[in-house]
Structure formats: structure tokens, C-alpha cells
């Protein structure tokens, strides 16, 4: 198979695996599993996300050892993920035990049995940055696959945006359903029209300083208690 055909085949495989519907958590888990399973030499993978408060967090690791590896990056504030998260770049270390860029982190990771790291900056729709991290127990494991950085960056961006849109739709459906149920309860309990019942819920939300969804949920949560008191 030529390099062109191999790239086309791998691109299609990654696209197919990441196109399945799911929320953001499911999509991140699928990204790390796909990276581990499709990139030769990858022993484990994770995603680091940078929150608005600037703290980094590890999500969807494929191996528990990654919690130790990423915690070391966070503690020392050095490592490929830091640059990849900030700049959405592809950062590669072919031998962490000897990499002068990270004199403390590299040897620490080598002590965990991980010698190669490839960090790929990706855009996370809900956080200020993210990086897909691939680890290998072998030296120079990804030298022939650095071109995969752009592939995973673009595919992950599409998958996460799709997941965000799906979550927004699901939240909207939940909101409409909850508010409709609460309005129906008020109509039945107070003998009001639909318009008057919705006004009741709206005024309750204002009085309690809640969103309309929170007010509707509070009304529904109060029903079992009130029911028992009347019984």
C-alpha cells in the first residue's frame, strides 16, 4: 500500500470511528481509544483539558498510569502537553529520558516506563484548550506518524463540535419537556389556562432568582412532598 493509500485508509477509519453520535465525554473517550488503537506504537492515550481557571485536568485515559504521567506534568509545569494545549501545536519527544526541553518531567516519565510522547493540540468547545497525548514504552515510536497530528486535530475538532451541538439539542429538549410538565401541573393544581400557568412559573422563577428550567424542576420536585402532606 502506498503512503497516499495508507493515509486515505487511516483518515477514513478515524473519521468513521469519531463520527458516531455521543456527548462530549463519550466523544473524548472515543478519541483516546481511537488514537491508541489506530496509531502504531501507541500504548496509551489521554486528553488534557485546560479550564478557564487555567488548571489542567486529565480526561478519558486509556490506562491508569496516565494519571501519574499527567500529574507529573501538572506538578512540574513542563512537558509536551503544556505547549500543545496552549498553542494547538503538535509536540513530539522521541526520547523523554534525554530530552533537554523537559529536564525534570522527561526522566520522571521514563521512570514510569514511558519513553515517547506525542501531544496534539485540539480545540475543546467548552474549555480554553486541550491536547491529545499519546504515549509509548518504546523510543522514537511515532517518528513515522507525525503527520497524524493534523489528522487527529481536525477530526477531533469536528467530533467535539458535533458532540457540543448534540448536547445543546438534548438540553433544549429536556428544558422544553420539564417546563411543559411543570406548566401542566400548575394548570391542573390551580385550575389555570396554559398561558396563566406559564406566567405563574415565570413569576416563581423571578421571585426565587432561578432560571425558568430551574423553577420548573423545583415545582416538579416539590410534588411528592406535597402529595404526602395532603394524604
Image (cartoon, rainbow, N blue to C red):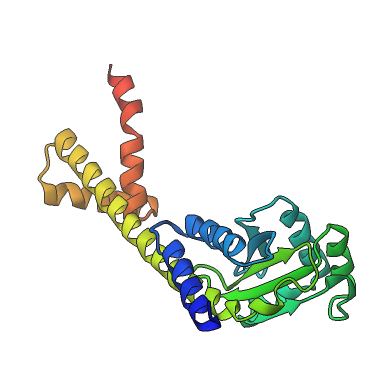
Res 197 visible: yes
Q: Extreme top residue here?
A: 231
Q: Which residue is pictured at 20% across the width and 45% down the height?
A: 183
Q: Residue furthest left?
A: 193
Which residue is at a point 86% across and 77% down the rendered structure image?
Answer: 99
Q: Residue at x 15, y 35 (%)?
A: 188
**Could you tell whether 113 is left or right of 168 in the image?**
right
- Coordinates of residue 6 in the picture (x, y in percent): 52, 76
Q: Nearer the viewer, residue 121 or 195?
A: 121
Question: Total label count?
Answer: 0
Q: Residue furthest front?
A: 1
Residue 168 vertical placement versus 90 (above, below): above
Q: Residue 176, position in %: x, y?
A: 25, 53
Q: Nearer the viewer, residue 16 or 131?
A: 16
The quarter of the picture where residue 29 lies is bottom right
Identify the residue at horizontal 64%, vertical 66% (top origin).
40
Whether residue 26 is situated above or below residue 105 in the rendered picture: above
Q: Is residue 223 above or below residue 12?
A: above
Residue 125 lies left or right of residue 105; in this view the side is left
Which image quadrant is residue 118 in? bottom right
In the rendered image, the vertical position of residue 67 relative to residue 106, given as above or below: above
Query: Viewed as shown, does residue 156 lie left or right of 221?
Result: right
**27 or 5, nearer to the observer:** 5
Q: Position of residue 16 (x, y in %)?
A: 42, 65
Q: Residue 30 in the image: x percent, y percent?
A: 51, 58
Q: Quadrant of the C terminus?
A: top left
Viewer can see residue 83: no
Amino acid at each position: 500500500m502506498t503512503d497516499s493509500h495508507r493515509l486515505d485508509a487511516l483518515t477514513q477509519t478515524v473519521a468513521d470511528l469519531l463520527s458516531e453520535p455521543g456527548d462530549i465525554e463519550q466523544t473524548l473517550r472515543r478519541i483516546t481509544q481511537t488514537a491508541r488503537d489506530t496509531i502504531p506504537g501507541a500504548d496509551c492515550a489521554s486528553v488534557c483539558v485546560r479550564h478557564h481557571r487555567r488548571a489542567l485536568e486529565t480526561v478519558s485515559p486509556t490506562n491508569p498510569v496516565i494519571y501519574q504521567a499527567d500529574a507529573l506534568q501538572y506538578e512540574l509545569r513542563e512537558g509536551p502537553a503544556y505547549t500543545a494545549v496552549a498553542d494547538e501545536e503538535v509536540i513530539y519527544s522521541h526520547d523523554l529520558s534525554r530530552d533537554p526541553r523537559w529536564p525534570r518531567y522527561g526522566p520522571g516519565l521514563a521512570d514510569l516506563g514511558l519513553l515517547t510522547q506525542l501531544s496534539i493540540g485540539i480545540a475543546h468547545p467548552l474549555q480554553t484548550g486541550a491536547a491529545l497525548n499519546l504515549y509509548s514504552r518504546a523510543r522514537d515510536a511515532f517518528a513515522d506518524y507525525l503527520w497524524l497530528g493534523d489528522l487527529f486535530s481536525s477530526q477531533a475538532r469536528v467530533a467535539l463540535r458535533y458532540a457540543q451541538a448534540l448536547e445543546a439539542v438534548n438540553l433544549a429538549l429536556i428544558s422544553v419537556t420539564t417546563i411543559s410538565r411543570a406548566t401542566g401541573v400548575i394548570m391542573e393544581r390551580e385550575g389555570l389556562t396554559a398561558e396563566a400557568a406559564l406566567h405563574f412559573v415565570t413569576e416563581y422563577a423571578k421571585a426565587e432568582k432561578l432560571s425558568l428550567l430551574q423553577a420548573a424542576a423545583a415545582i416538579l420536585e416539590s410534588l411528592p412532598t406535597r402529595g404526602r402532606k395532603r394524604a
